[in-house]
Amino acid sequence: MPYQSDIEIAQSVAPAPIEDIAASLGLARRDIELYGDYKAKVVPAVAQRLQERPDGKLILVTAITPTPAGEGKTTTTVGLGDALHKMGKKTVLALREPSLGPVFGIKGGAAGGGWAQVIPMEDINLHFTGDMHAIGAANNLLAAMLDNHIHQGNALGIDVRRITWKRCVDMNDRQLRQVTDGLGGRLNGVPREDGFDITVASEIMAILCLADGLEDLKQKLASIVVGYTRDEQPVTAGQLKAQGAMAALLKDAIKPNLVQTLEHTPALVHGGPFANIAHGCNSVAATRLALKLGDYVVTEAGFGADLGAEKFLDIKCRKAGLKPDAVVIVATVRALKHHGGAAKADLTSENLDALEKGLPNLLKHIENITVKFGLPAVVAINRFPADTEAELALVRRKCEEMGANVALSEVWAKGGEGGLELAEEVLRLTEKPNHFRMMYADEQPLREKIEAVVQEIYGGDGGDYLPAAARELDKLENLGYGCLPVCMAKTQYSLSDNPALTGWPKGFRVTVKNVRLSAGAGFVVVLTGDIMTMPGLPKVPAAEAIDVDADGRITGLF
């Protein structure tokens, strides 16, 4: 019998009215703004009202380095939340919003999978409540006001060769990476080289996810550096008087979105910066609200622990004053065999040799979480039917040697029931003392921060800086931005900046190609290797399989 697709499973379950989900958290009808029957936004007054309530326990879910075999991080996150809910624990999920780029590209959505999903999955994976569109509109309003200022006389003396602000669109569209605009005569603007980022790489996305209310949002927006004058002085969105209108576009987008899982566990799905080109975490507003509403909060960070978890801990926790109580590292036997050199077609066959060769990738992530960051961790093996007992025993033994227990997760097939073993271990870990520390201090120079991440988290020998990157780092230090954390933009497919180096590579150096200031968000983006801020579609994009019938029922969405 063929397996049901994710969307078929999601469409087979009747969701509870969102008012009932809100009521389970102690929220009244006045506390939410309805977006149909099964989606809502939580009004800011709720967070203000609950300020004095003690925080729940914060559980961070991360993963090994991604492979084509898949890891199931979001699926595990949702299933763990359902398992805790099933055990009678007041649990809230805090998840990221998907981007349309991966949805129509190759990666897929971000609503989980199998019997561990957030619903309505079609809405969440497509337009949802319009947050992405609002972010894109605010980003492009600033771009329009910048170019209009130049066209209308350029009173600020902006050097058109030193404009750093890009337009954005929430789609994988390589054609827009580099463009020339303002052509066609004086009335059409000033000709210049330009380009687009994907919306989830926009600084507006980062700002929305790190802002503490509307006033803080406006201050952060005003601090955005859009370019430089002819004498190398930064020009901000505040100088263009853009922050008020941008905030007006974002006034609803800043409110966390409330939905539910297949098992009716409440979920706040809000914000979605990519972890390979941005900081990879859901909004501070959603996480803080979840901590006030639930006794246990399960959240995730993007891609592997070297990317999403590092940025969650070094950027989000630094900015928001958060500290995880436990960390889950998701792995699959098949992915570890791929790291050990097994071909994708052979991953269903027992291969202890390839597994042992691939295990160092998992062990490095365990070391990073437990030793480098000082947090208690459990390894969640997302179990597949082809996994053998000998393979599972090998993983368990190697992890226990590193001081991390292993729990099997079968949430894809069994929902919350399949996550009870993992939930029990997580509950145990949340009661243990931890010694959380960050990789670097605010006062360290930018190069030292980069080297700390490269050497300690990636396991590399250090960084090599192209001339443009070196000059930009020096400039930012001189302008007073050296105190900011670094947001490393790196391939997700390797601990190094070379996607071909799987497992736990040794003896490599990371090439820093360029550096971007995100003054509003409060970090410096460090571009390494061949990473791009505008992805492209694959040869056969997922969009080719997606359709909708005459009744509006969507098919082919995973």
Image (cartoon, helix red, strand yellow):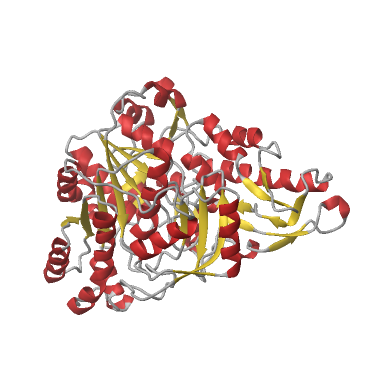
365 w.r.t. 153: above or below: below
262 w.r.t. 75: above or below: above
Counting from the top left corner in percent of width and height, residue 442 is at 43, 47
- Residue drawn at (32%, 25%) of the image: 23
* Residue 528 shown left or right of residue 197 in the figure: left
423 w.r.t. 193: above or below: above
Counting from the top left corner in percent of width and height, residue 286 is at 40, 37
Can the viewer see residue 114 in this picture?
no
Considering depth in this image, is 312 or 195 the residue closer to the camera?
312
- Residue drawn at (16%, 47%) of the image: 420
Counting from the top left corner in percent of width and height, residue 427 is at 17, 42
159 w.r.t. 204: above or below: below
Specify the quadrant of the image occupied by residue 432: top left
> How many marks are shown on the rendered structure?
0
Can the viewer see residue 495 in this picture?
yes
* Residue 154 shown left or right of residue 476 in the figure: right
- Residue drawn at (84%, 45%) of the image: 153
Question: Which quadrant: the N terminus?
Answer: bottom left
Considering depth in this image, is 156 or 144 the residue closer to the camera?
156
- Residue drawn at (23%, 52%) of the image: 411
* Residue 495 shown left or right of residue 131 in the figure: left
Specify the quadrant of the image occupied by residue 88: top left
Question: Which quadrant: the C terminus?
Answer: bottom left
Considering depth in this image, is 321 or 125 the residue closer to the camera?
321
Counting from the top left corner in percent of width and height, residue 376 is at 21, 50
Residue that protrudes farthest toward the right in the picture: 186
